[in-house]
Amino acid sequence: MNAGIEWLVGLENWMSSVVFARGISPEELAVRMGAAPEGATDPITDSQAWALDMEGYRPGGDGDGVVRVGECGGWAFALEYGDSTGGERLAEISRDGVEAVRYVPMQEHPPATVGYARDGVLLCSFGLHEENHRFGAEPDVLVPDLCRSGARTRREDASCSRRPR
């Protein structure tokens, strides 16, 4: 994993989501996603995670799954495998000034989706290549970044239609 998070592109098995958080440790991210604080194990590979019997990830909670955590570039990240529900807690994960982003690849039923929360509030969410359909408390908060990336946004978004000459 010396190449940052480039390894995400080559994951061979299905996963349910990746959550990134800035302002907390990977261990705290796992706990905010519902893992038991003492539940950490040694790092495992994608194939090893998929081969696990994914029962009991969240003590007393719904969903079966497993989470792998790490850190890159000041962002903690967690990969969820199986029927995990940690991403449904994006606003909670982002409490106390934390920024959180959830990416769901939706490999079997596109589009992939992205959600962004900050300080306990889901600010924006949308499907990739469907950026013109955004929702959340501040659905336009990422429009400048989307425009810089070349993503399609609503025609009425002046920030995308006005380009310097």
Image (cartoon, rainbow, N blue to C red):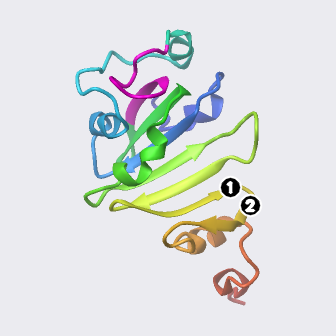
Label 1 sits on what residue type? Gly
The residue nearer to you, when weighing 62 against 137, is 62
The residue that appears at 70% across and 85% down in the rendered structure is 163
Placement of 89 over or under 15, stated as above or below: below
Say whether marks 1 and 2 touch (CB < 8 Å).
yes
Q: Residues within 10 Å of mark 1 (few under 14, many from 20)?
A: some
**Percent of width and height locating residue 118:** 38, 61
The residue that appears at 43% across and 50% down in the rendered structure is 90
For residue 15, what is the image quadrant? top right
The residue that appears at 33% across and 29% down in the rendered structure is 35
Quadrant for the C terminus in the image: bottom right
Placement of 87 over or under 38, stated as above or below: below
Which residue does the numbered mark 2 point to in the structure image? 130
Which numbered circle lies on residue 93?
Answer: none
Q: Is residue 70 left or right of residue 160?
A: left
**Percent of width and height locating residue 34:** 35, 34
Label 2 sits on what residue type? Glu
Cα gap from disc 1 to disc 2, whole angstroms: 5 Å
**Percent of width and height locating residue 72:** 40, 41
Q: Is residue 21 left or right of residue 148?
A: left
**Percent of width and height locating residue 113:** 64, 50
The residue nearer to you, when weighing 150 against 134, is 134
Q: Which residues are magenta?
A: 54-70
Placement of 70 over or under 101, stated as above or below: above
Which residue does the numbered mark 1 point to in the structure image? 127
Placement of 103 over or under 65, stated as above or below: below
Q: How many marks?
A: 2
Residue 6 covered by magenta stretch: no
Q: Is residue 164 left or right of residue 69?
A: right
The residue nearer to you, when weighing 122 against 99, is 122
The residue nearer to you, when weighing 109 against 72, is 109
* Local SS, label 1: strand
